[in-house]
């Protein structure tokens, strides 16, 4: 046994984003799950926050959305001004029941397993085209040329964003999520500007769809009613922004993290190549190992407790997905990347009221792109350093140069 | 023991049907049908698995 229990926990600092630059601080999470599963973190520019690191506690917090509110203080750790907080509450992400259910219902029918099944052929074609476009180049930036494309094409198509505008929407979504990364914006003050641009675009799309309705989510939202009322322009725009953000960043992140894991774990990649029936469990293991969302914030609406720890009304609680996904009480050998792991009840998509609306879609996209990539470009390797997003909110990769044997020069695998 | 479903939460993910097809069925129109609100003791562990498997945590076993 390591003598970790004698160490104080004072070296742990989950508030400093730079402590995530080398990847998730799993050594800290492991100690916290064992020694302080509900851990208080001071922060320099705020009141401090509680950290929930155990699997069962993350479920328990998620199952009580009115006690651990997304609405009261938003879902990000930093404190918002009054106007910003009001604005953030137009996003489903930052609503509580019963309001949350009313808005979610407007789009949830578009994401059920049966509806997503109808996209199998189309997403297959998109994935094929994406790999076609790089297959003869022998090298590319994996994030920009591969990982970013399928989610962007898919969610934009579902919403109704035409081809020519997709890049613009994608760039705006980067600015909105990369709030701690100087490559995307100098500081958080740029977010309102990107948001205004995103809203401006949504206004244009709404006007277009009012004239010419289509079979897409934009048209469905324009026709939708909550309590007998149509959505306001701001509500429509917020919906648009959330779908664009949540649909882009997360799947891109998991695609890039998944390829990184496949390159770093050549034995795992070989096992999947030898038996592609392992792909679905491999995808679930990627999701467990590097979930896109690192934490969400909740705010206690009453005095309560978690695992015996007193939490006071108004205090912030962060739930940490990468930690829950490596909880020793749930997963055998949790630090091992095991593409055959089954069962694998990870929490990469969350659970309960805010369970990821796009989970079925994401699973389809990930399985489809990895089937295409692994079978056609099986010797992909790093061609330069992997550059991570500076963030303790999204486990993103900004740039991942890769090289591989061009497809036409590869001997065909006997099938 | 009685099965209670919160239909405001249910989004037809059909995980319950996989865990316990004897009780849960998601039909062609994505409606969840609970074939029987009560169940035999022999199904207890399968129903509990269905409760756990629901990503929306929409199923409860009520003790009444």
Image: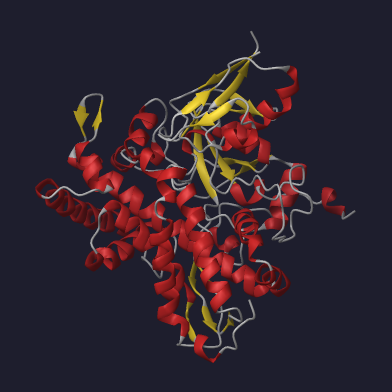
Q: Is residue A296 above or below residue A25?
A: above
Q: Residue furthest top?
A: B64
Tell me residue B52's x, y (percent).
Answer: 64, 33
Tell me residue B54's x, y (percent).
Answer: 57, 34
In the depicted view, which residue is nearer to us: A34 or A406?
Answer: A406
Q: Is residue A284 left or right of residue A197?
A: right
Q: Residue furthest right?
A: A1
Residue A178: in sight, yes or no?
A: no
Q: Residue furthest left?
A: A211
Tell me residue A369's x, y (percent).
Answer: 50, 66
In the depicted view, which residue is nearer to us: A305 or A280?
Answer: A280
Q: Is residue A68 above or below residue A161?
A: above
Q: Quadrant of the C terminus of chain A?
A: bottom right
Which residue is found at the position 44% from the left and 81% from the top?
A: A134
Which residue is found at the position 59% from the left and 84% from the top?
A: A412
Q: Is residue A344 above or below residue B28?
A: below
Tell me residue A171's x, y (percent).
Answer: 32, 66
Residue B39: in sight, yes or no?
A: yes
Which residue is found at the position 62% from the left and 29% from the top?
A: B51
């Amino acid at each position: 046994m390591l003598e970790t229990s004698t160490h104080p926990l004072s070296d742990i600092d989950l508030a400093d984003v730079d402590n995530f630059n080398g990847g998730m601080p799993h050594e800290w999470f492991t100690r916290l799950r064992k020694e302080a599963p509900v851990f208080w973190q001071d922060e320099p520019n705020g009141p401090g926050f509680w950290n929930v690191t155990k699997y069962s506690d993350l479920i328990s917090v998620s199952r009580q959305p009115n006690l651990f509110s997304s609405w009261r203080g938003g879902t990000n750790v930093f404190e918002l001004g009054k106007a910003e907080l009001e604005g953030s509450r137009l996003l489903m992400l930052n609503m509580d029941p019963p309001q949350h259910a009313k808005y979610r219902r407007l789009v949830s029918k578009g994401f059920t397993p049966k509806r997503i099944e109808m996209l199998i052929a189309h997403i297959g074609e998109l994935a094929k085209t994406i790999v076609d476009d790089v297959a003869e180049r022998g090298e590319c930036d994996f994030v920009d040329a591969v990982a970013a494309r399928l989610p962007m094409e898919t969610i934009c198509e579902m919403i109704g964003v035409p081809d020519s505008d997709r890049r613009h929407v994608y760039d705006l979504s980067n600015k909105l999520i990369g709030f701690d990364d100087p490559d995307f914006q100098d500081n958080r003050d740029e977010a309102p500007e990107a948001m205004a641009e995103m809203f401006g675009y949504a206004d244009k799309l709404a006007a277009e769809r009012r004239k010419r309705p289509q079979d897409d989510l934009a048209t469905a939202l324009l026709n939708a009613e909550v309590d007998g009322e149509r959505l306001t322009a701001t509500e429509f725009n917020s919906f648009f922004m959330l779908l664009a953000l949540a649909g882009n960043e997360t799947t891109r992140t998991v695609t890039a993290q998944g390829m990184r894991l496949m390159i770093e774990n050549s034995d795992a990649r070989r096992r999947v190549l030898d038996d592609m029936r392992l792909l679905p469990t491999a995808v679930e293991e990627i999701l467990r190992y590097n979930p896109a969302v690192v934490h969400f914030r909740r705010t206690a609406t009453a005095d309560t407790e978690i695992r015996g720890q007193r939490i006071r009304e108004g205090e912030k609680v962060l739930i940490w997905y990468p930690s829950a996904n490596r909880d020793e009480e749930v997963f055998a050998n949790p630090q091992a990347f095991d593409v055959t792991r089954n069962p694998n009840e990870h929490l990469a998509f969350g659970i309960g009221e805010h369970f990821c609306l796009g989970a079925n879609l994401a699973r389809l996209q990930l399985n489809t792109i990895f089937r295409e990539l692994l079978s056609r470009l099986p010797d992909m390797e790093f061609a330069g350093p992997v550059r991570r997003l500076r963030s303790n909110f999204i486990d993103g990769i900004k740039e991942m140069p890769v090289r591989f044997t061009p497809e036409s020069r590869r001997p065909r695998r006997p099938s | 023991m009685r099965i209670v479903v919160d239909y405001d939460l249910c989004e037809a993910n059909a995980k319950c049907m996989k865990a316990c097809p004897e009780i849960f069925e998601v039909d062609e129109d994505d409606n969840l049908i609970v074939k029987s609100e009560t169940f035999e003791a022999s199904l207890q562990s399968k129903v509990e698995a269905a409760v756990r498997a629901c990503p929306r945590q929409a199923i409860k076993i009520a003790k009444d």
